[in-house]
Image (cartoon, helix red, strand yellow):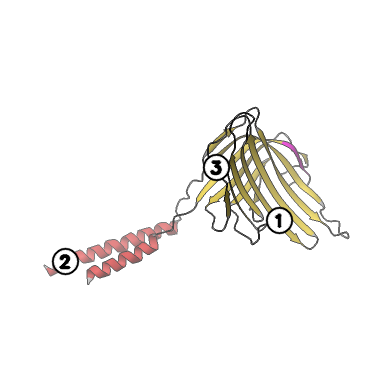
Amino acid sequence: MMARRLVGLLMIVSSIVAVPAPAAVYLATFSGTTGVSWDFTGEFGGNGSLAGLPFTATFRLTVPTPGAITSNDGTSVTIRGGTENDPDVPTPVSGSATVNGVTRNIAGLYRGLATRTNGFTGPGTGSDVLEFQVSDDHEQGYFSATRYMLIRLESSSRNLFDDVDPGSPLFYERQPGDLTYGNIALEDMNYDPNSSGPTDVNASIGFLVDRMTIAVEPEAVPEPATWATFIAGFGLIGAGMRRQRRTDDLSI
């Protein structure tokens, strides 16, 4: 009887402690200097040109993202999602950029895309391409707000990678012959002819990429409540085992 209770207790505790295997999360981090860049409304703490400043841009890719669309033709893999699709699908990519000490986040709710193409077969023959995109679009009446970021690396003069997994670990440094470009744009548009509200681009920052890495995001430390659950579960198991031992001793 006690053995059956102990087995039942173990099953309950295991159901509390067990958690599903999480999806893999990859961080693609780009750094370099800003190219042609303008901040008209202080989005990045400036009021005019922001060219020549250091920048960091990070894209967060979650694989798998249930419902996201994946295409694979053997030499190129693209993972995408967002409300631009019909029907809407969850986005696998979000992003952020830091310029002039100011960070702006883009959730990728309208578009989140990651693609890697392993097409280089020799100098001048085919290209290796890595690209990330995120976009948030909001429209209400005459008002439209867009937050958009794209970074693309491309080379037809050398091999950048040997696989097509967008989340595969990678370290990149720009070399002569590589084509790298990117941009983050923040736009607030008001199409009401009777309004004097925002009608133009708030900020547009060009990126000149010097280096980038793709790595697995470090796992988060369990929350105190999770540790408490673990400890309570182990305590219940120990109590059950001690009770079973005392019952066995008395039966002897």
From the viewer's side, name the closer residue of 182 and 249: 182
CB of mark 2 within 8 Å of CB of mark 1? Answer: no
Circle 3 or circle 2, nearest the eye: 3
Q: Which residue does the image show at 62% across and 37% down from the upper left?
A: 31
**Mark closer to the chain start, 2 or 1:** 1
Q: Secondary structure at mark 1?
A: strand
Query: Which residue extends farthest top?
Result: 176
* Residue labelled with disc 2: 248
**What residue is disc 3 on?**
164
Q: CA distance from mark 1 to mark 3?
A: 29 Å
> Could you say where residue 1 lies in the image, as x and y percent from the top left?
22, 72
| Residue annotated with mark 1 | 137
Q: Which residue shows up at 36% across the image and 58% down it?
A: 231
Distance of mark 3 from mark 2, alpha carbons? Answer: 60 Å
Horizontal arrangement in the rendering, residue 7 relative to residue 179 (left or right): left
Counting the numbered discs, the total is 3
Amino acid found under the numbered disc labelled 1: Asp
* 2 vs 1, front mark: 1
Is the C-beta separation of discs 3 and 2 under 8 Å?
Answer: no
Q: Mark 2 or mark 3, which is nearer the start of the sequence?
A: 3
Residue closest to the far left: 252
Which SS does the magenta portion mostly show?
Answer: strand
Q: Is 185 inside the magenta-drawn segment?
A: no
Image coords of residue 248 (percent x, y): 16, 66
> Image quadrant for the C terminus?
bottom left
Q: Residues within 10 Å of mark 1 (few under 14, many from 20)?
A: some
Q: Which residues are magenta?
A: 35-39
